[in-house]
Image (cartoon, rainbow, N blue to C red):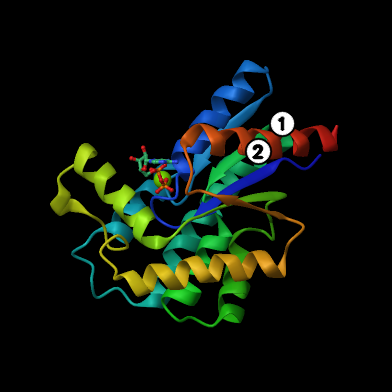
């Protein structure tokens, strides 16, 4: 049984919005599942996230950033993801290893081979079975993220990643598309520049097709 599904895409691409809606859909079908996210899927990961996202940490080097995300992933895989998969649950995960290649590789310039070594070790080689990539122009994603932050919290508290310039986010978008091109069987490319309901319809189709295929 292969049921590890990840949600990837730039800031504001609608990952968290869509994952919540799929969770409601699976709950309605009585399919056992969990929803989780990186890096904050565990208590330890939440604390690591506190270090990663703190905007006072502008001196953090790329290697530290990568090790911290991988440390959170090591805990997450062992404490949450593997146990859920062993119970045959569908795991819906908001960001995973692809984000490390996109952000710390293309974004921060780290060697992908170095990332592969550390990431594979941290993740016990666990790869997603299906990855939904939410793609849209960075300007639109960042505007959505800014509007969300204005609603949720003080605009001045935007995190270290949201503070990056547009070309950083453009590199992330391009990197995700390139990862998809290198592993087309695992990915579904979703045009995220549409209404929430239209995107959700497509997401449900991919998820339900995928789960049925395995049954
Ligand atoms: N398809 C959409 N069209 C317009 N706004 C959206 C859409 N999807 C999400 N949003 C809004 O955009 C913001 C960012 O969405 P979110 O799901 O938090 O993105 P992510 O988790 O990828 O950063 C939220 O305020 C959300 O309500
Ligand atoms: Mg989110």
- Residue drawn at (26%, 50%) of the image: 146
In the displayed structure image, the side of residue 77 where residue 58 appears, left or right: left
In the displayed structure image, the side of residue 181 where residue 52 appears, left or right: left
Q: Residues within 10 Å of mark 2 (few under 14, many from 20)?
A: few
- Residue drawn at (21%, 62%) of the image: 55
Vertical comparison of 68 with 105: above or below: above
Cα distance between the residues tagged 2 and 1:
6 Å
- Residue drawn at (39%, 61%) of the image: 138
Residue 155 spot, x, y in % from top left: 16, 49
In the displayed structure image, the side of residue 110 where residue 167 appears, left or right: left
Q: Are marks 2 and 1 in contact (CB under 8 Å)?
A: yes
The answer to which quarter of the image holds residue 51 is bottom left
Check disc 1 and report its element: helix, strand or loop. loop
In the displayed structure image, the side of residue 204 where residue 36 appears, left or right: left
Check disc 2 and report its element: helix, strand or loop. helix
Residue 53 spot, x, y in % from top left: 30, 58
- Does residue 125 appear in this view? yes
Front-most of 213 and 119? 213
Front-most of 126 and 27? 27
Vertical comparison of 85 with 44: above or below: above
Disc 2 target residue: 83
Front-most of 42 and 95? 95
Front-most of 195 and 122? 195
- Does residue 101 appear in this view? no
Residue 60 spot, x, y in % from top left: 30, 73
Q: Residues within 10 Å of mark 1 (few under 14, many from 20)?
A: few
The dot on residue 87 is 1
Q: Quadrant of ligand 2?
A: top left
């Amino acid at each position: 049984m292969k049921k590890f599904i990840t949600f990837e895409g730039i800031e504001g691409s609608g990952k968290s919005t869509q994952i919540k809606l799929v969770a409601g859909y699976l709950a309605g079908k009585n399919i056992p599942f969990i929803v989780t996210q990186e890096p904050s899927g565990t208590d330890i990961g939440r604390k690591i996230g506190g270090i990663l996202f703190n905007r006072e940490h502008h001196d953090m080097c790329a290697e530290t950033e990568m090790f911290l995300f991988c440390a959170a992933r090591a805990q997450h895989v062992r404490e949450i993801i593997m146990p859920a998969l062993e119970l045959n649950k569908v795991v819906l995960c908001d960001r995973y290893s692809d984000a490390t290649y996109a952000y710390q590789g293309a974004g921060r310039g780290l060697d992908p081979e170095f990332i592969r070594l550390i990431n594979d070790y941290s993740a016990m080689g666990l790869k997603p079975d299906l990855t939904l990539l939410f793609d849209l122009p960075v300007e639109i994603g960042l505007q959505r993220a800014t509007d969300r932050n204005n609603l949720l919290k003080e605009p001045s508290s935007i995190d270290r990643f949201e503070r990056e310039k547009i070309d950083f986010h453009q590199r992330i978008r391009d990197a995700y598309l390139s990862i998809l091109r290198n592993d087309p069987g695992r990915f579904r490319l979703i045009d995220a520049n549409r209404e929430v309901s239209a995107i959700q319809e497509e997401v449900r189709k991919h998820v339900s097709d995928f789960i049925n295929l395995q049954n």
